Image: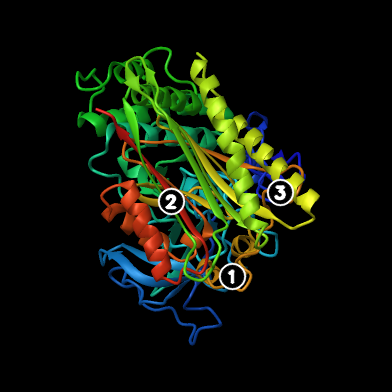
């Protein structure tokens, strides 16, 4: 277990963030959380539904010729309710969509809304995770969409044991329950898993490499829990979930002792590289392919050479380097749109925004650099607009000087540290004004530094940053608001948050204290990806999917911002509305 240095919560090995307070954990301290010796013997709980006292009659029914699928709304294992039949061969197999029985406060499974990792390691009555241990996102308590596979064939012992482990990782969709019931005179073996779509038939090269890197890191997590595919993983072991490839079929997985894990690791990594090669070339061999980049062919050679890769992290790092090197050589430009509006209810615009872009040419390739800020002031007339204006004035003075200095440097810039430093500088400026004036002025803030195809995001409060691309729209930031906490703790549903009477209560703002905690996020973009920064006057009025449709149907980012603001006003315009949309595109 890993003990959080801040709140002393014990977290699963491999966790990146504390599940209680969200503090970043030191991954190198990770140790195996549940060793093989700690787990109970692999048994499949069996319940005879014919002799169950809760059912009428005790005489077993005659053995049927085949497994008949159960009707809709059937109950499995006293815990899962079927909502639809997905598949049946009317012989020995069936699959259902199911959900846990009970209210949201009694559910034993929770799913991260961002990375999709399913948390199942806490017991009824214990405090559930508040933050995802894989990606740090605040958890929501709502029913998890699940699949239940039913068969007359017994489950492998290793699969039953894996279902008991409570594995939590963004690239793992391990089984969460395994049991057996006697119904209609036969044993029905049931396995409950999170759903995943099939691996796409065609994948863009960089996307496939990135997805494979995630699978490689997940292998390290599985090894630490003594789970390996022992070189037997194939394409059927992998699915697509939350726009990432995940390990989803564990029927080929085994539980290994430590002495056998090293060879299992080497074989699994070879198999994963072979799958990547097949996805990109269509070939089942791993011979050098002239259509692949030379670095990728060299990586394949290393994987199957005497040295090989000794860890998933090493393989993932090598794969990500190939992607980053290929992207850094691309000539990039930004298309920028921005719009702010008072709305139709307020008579004063307390929102403010700032955008600056500088053009750089690195090795004959355009590599733009930009800083974009949205601030939503609060505190009423002569307070809210002063707070947001002070933030913008601070960056208007600071950013051009820093950009000029950075352009003269030959080394890379630590933008995450720069964001924390400058946001705290803006916070101090507002705090000093607030203290001197004796007001309650404050502001939320969301900002982005975009350096070529790298985006560095920071937020304080409930102004938001979204990633918009071909896969859809994804919120990157987490609101520091009362409603977000109520959603995370399962007290309200997300759809109720839009109309909650306390939806505007924010517990972390610029100017409230002399120092402020800043959330920072880093993204690597693809050409065509867009970053949307907006105040709550936009996202409270428009559903994410509505905003996505408007952006997709707009001819350029400026037209999109105009239409987003107009749509928010049409929906009520209850607050000031501000949006900045930045699209990264190839310059050639």
Q: Nearer the viewer, residue 509 or 31?
A: 509
Earlier in the chain: of badge 1 and badge 3, it is 1
Camera sees residue 149: no
Q: Residues within 10 Å of mark 1 (few under 14, many from 20)?
A: some
Q: Residues within 10 Å of mark 3 (few under 14, many from 20)?
A: many
- Of circles 2 and 3, the one toward us is 3
Earlier in the chain: of badge 2 and badge 1, it is 2
Tag 3 residue: 511
Tag 1 residue: 492
| Left or right: 402, with 545 as reference point | right
Residue at disc 2, secondary structure: strand
Mark 2 → mark 3, Cα distance in angstroms = 28 Å
Tag 2 residue: 474
Earlier in the chain: of badge 2 and badge 3, it is 2
Camera sees residue 390: yes
Q: Nearer the viewer, residue 552 or 250?
A: 552
Q: Nearer the viewer, residue 280 or 510?
A: 510
Residue at disc 3, secondary structure: loop
Residue at figure coordinates x 60%, y 46% from the top left: 133
Tell me: residue 84, above or below residue 218: below
Mark 2 → mark 1, Cα distance in angstroms = 21 Å
């Amino acid at each position: 277990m890993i003990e959080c240095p801040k709140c002393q919560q014990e977290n699963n090995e491999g966790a990146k963030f504390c599940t209680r307070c969200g503090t970043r954990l030191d991954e190198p301290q990770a140790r195996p959380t549940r060793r093989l010796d700690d787990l109970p013997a692999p048994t499949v709980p069996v319940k005879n539904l014919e002799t169950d006292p809760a059912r009428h009659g005790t005489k077993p029914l005659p053995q049927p010729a085949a497994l008949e699928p159960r009707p809709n709304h059937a109950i499995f294992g006293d815990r899962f309710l079927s909502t639809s039949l997905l598949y049946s061969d009317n012989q020995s197999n069936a699959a259902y969509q199911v959900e846990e029985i009970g209210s949201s406060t009694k559910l034993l499974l929770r799913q991260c809304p961002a990375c999709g990792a399913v948390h199942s390691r806490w017991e009824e009555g214990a405090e559930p995770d508040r933050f995802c241990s894989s990606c740090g996102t605040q958890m929501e308590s709502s029913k998890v969409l699940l699949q239940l596979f039913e068969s007359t064939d017994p489950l492998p012992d290793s699969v039953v044991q894996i279902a008991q482990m409570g594995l939590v990782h963004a690239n793992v969709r391990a089984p969460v329950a395994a049991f057996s019931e006697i119904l209609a005179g036969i044993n029905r073996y049931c396995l409950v898993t999170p759903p995943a779509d099939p691996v796409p038939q065609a994948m863009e090269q960089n996307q496939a490499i990135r997805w494979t890197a995630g699978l490689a890191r997940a292998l390290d997590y599985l090894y630490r829990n003594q789970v390996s595919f022992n070189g037997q993983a194939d394409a059927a072991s992998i699915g697509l979930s939350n726009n990432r490839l995940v390990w989803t079929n564990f029927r080929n997985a085994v539980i290994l002792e430590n002495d056998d894990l090293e060879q299992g690791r080497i074989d699994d990594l070879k198999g994963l590289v072979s799958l990547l090669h097949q996805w990109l070339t269509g070939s089942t061999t791993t011979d050098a392919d002239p259509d692949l980049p030379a670095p990728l062919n060299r990586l394949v050679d290393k994987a199957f050479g005497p040295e090989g890769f000794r860890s998933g992290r090493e393989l993932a790092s090598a794969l990500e380097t190939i992607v980053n090197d290929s992207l850094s050589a691309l000539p990039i430009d930004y298309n920028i749109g921005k719009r702010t509006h008072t709305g139709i209810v307020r008579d004063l615009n307390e929102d403010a925004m700032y955008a600056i872009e500088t053009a750089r040419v690195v090795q004959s390739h355009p590599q733009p650099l930009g800083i974009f800020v949205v601030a939503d002031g609060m505190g009423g007339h002569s307070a809210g607009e002063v707070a947001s204006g002070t933030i913008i004035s601070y960056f208007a003075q600071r950013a051009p000087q820093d950009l000029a200095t950075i352009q003269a440097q030959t080394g890379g810039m630590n933008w995450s540290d720069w964001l924390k430093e400058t946001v705290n500088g803006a916070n101090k400026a507002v705090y000093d004004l607030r203290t001197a004036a004796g007001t309650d002025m404050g502001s939320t803030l969301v900002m982005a530094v975009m350096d070529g195809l790298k985006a560095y995001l920071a937020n304080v409060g409930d102004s938001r940053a979204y990633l918009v691309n071909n896969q859809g729209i994804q919120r990157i930031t987490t609101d520091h608001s009362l409603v977000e906490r109520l959603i995370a703790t399962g007290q309200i549903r997300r759809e109720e948050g839009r109309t909650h009477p306390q939806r505007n209560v924010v517990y972390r703002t610029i100017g409230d204290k002399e120092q402020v905690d800043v959330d920072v996020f880093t993204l690597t973009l693809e050409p065509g990806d867009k970053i949307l920064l907006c105040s709550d006057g936009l996202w409270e009025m428009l559903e994410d999917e509505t905003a996505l449709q408007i952006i997709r149907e707009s001819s350029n980012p400026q037209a999109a911002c105009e239409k987003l603001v107009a749509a928010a006003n049409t929906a009520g315009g209850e607050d000031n509305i501000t949006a900045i949309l930045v699209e990264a595109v190839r310059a050639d």
